[in-house]
Image: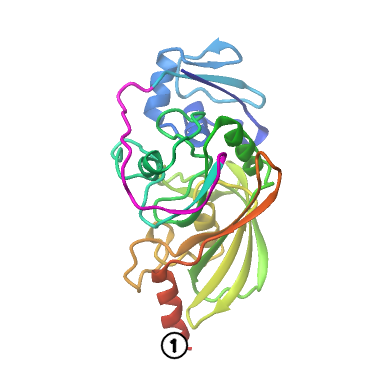
Amino acid sequence: METRTIVVSPEDAKKRIDIFLNEELDLSRSYIKTLIEKQNILVNSQEIKKAGYVVKDNDVITITIPEAEILNLEPENIDIDIIYEDDDFAVINKPQGMVVHPAPGAYEHTLVNALLYHLKNLSDINGVVRPGIVHRLDKDTSGLIVVAKNNEAHLDLQEQIATKAAKRYYKALVDGIVKKDEGVINTLIDRSKKDRKMMAVSNDTGRIAITHFKVLERFRNYTFMEYELKTGRTHQIRVHSKFIGHPVVGDPVYGGSNKFNLNGQLLHAFKLELTHPRTKEHMEFFAPLPKYFEDVLDKLREKQ
């Protein structure tokens, strides 16, 4: 059984509790409703009756998640690119198309299934469904992801990401010509009112999202970009790219073109900086662009 406590911040006030917890904990709204009905979610130590409860600033929400009963994850001998590994953590270069952790409809062939096979130990802070997972990458985003091998390392790495002490850098190809050489995108991001599976820039609700960008190379109709995440909102780079009028190539969900017959967006987490949770050594990790990404860049350079 896992118990989590979350204090509502001003930027999240006035949200329905099922929406708020869906964003914070990555639990489905239907499951949150079930937890409420079973009195497993308390607000300020009091029971609530409905998933439509509107949270307030400084509300203290306590969530008790029962032990998973139906999910028995199987280790799978799936080839993964382990960039670095020691007794505390590992850094994986995740391929495009791989889901990070099991979820309804995808209990097999995930990164977690591969980790269970290749690594001897994984932290269990996130329970049986997400062992070792400190942060995530979208299914069709490739690149570096850090995995904790014990709970002490997990808490330390999680704190580094939450406080922005860990730095994450991405490369992307976007549609159109980005005119500014570099800049900062600073907005609120919330669930889309049109499609709850999508995120969107909002004028008055949601959470602060900050992305630094820099132009690496310009082509006739595309721009090769570098992004640094200052916050880690769901789909942040994809949403911010759309917001500035230059969606990521291969990302039709957020308006990106796909003239290169891609299987996902050209977005790659190429660099990760962190402090070793035990030795406190500053460490940097790099992952080269996937071949399909390099091939597209080569084609564009030939046409220049």
The percent position of residue 280, horizontal first and vertical second, equals 71, 43
Q: Residues within 10 Å of mark 1 (few under 14, many from 20)?
A: few
The colour scheme applied to this rendered structure is rainbow
User: Does residue 151 sit above or below 279 in this rendering?
Assistant: above
Q: Position of residue 55 (x, y in %)?
A: 57, 25
Give the camera-side residue of 171 and 129: 129
| Depth check, front residue: 151 or 44 | 151
- Residue 22, horizontal then vertical, whole percent: 47, 33
Q: Is residue 37 left or right of residue 180?
A: left
Q: Per the image, is 69 magenta?
A: yes
Q: Residue at x 43, y 48 (%)?
A: 198
Q: Is residue 68 visible?
A: yes
**Residue shown at 39% from the left, 38% from the top:** 116
Q: Which residue is mark 1?
A: 302
| Stretch in magenta | 68-88
Amino acid type at circle 1 is Glu
Vertical comparison of 174 with 28: above or below:
below
Res. 204 visible in picture: no
- Disc 1 is placed on an element classified as helix
Query: Does residue 52 belong to the magenta stretch?
Result: no
Towards the viewer: 212 or 111: 111
Quadrant for residue 29, please give it.
top left
Q: Residue at x 36, y 51 (%)?
A: 98
Magenta stretch, overall SS: loop
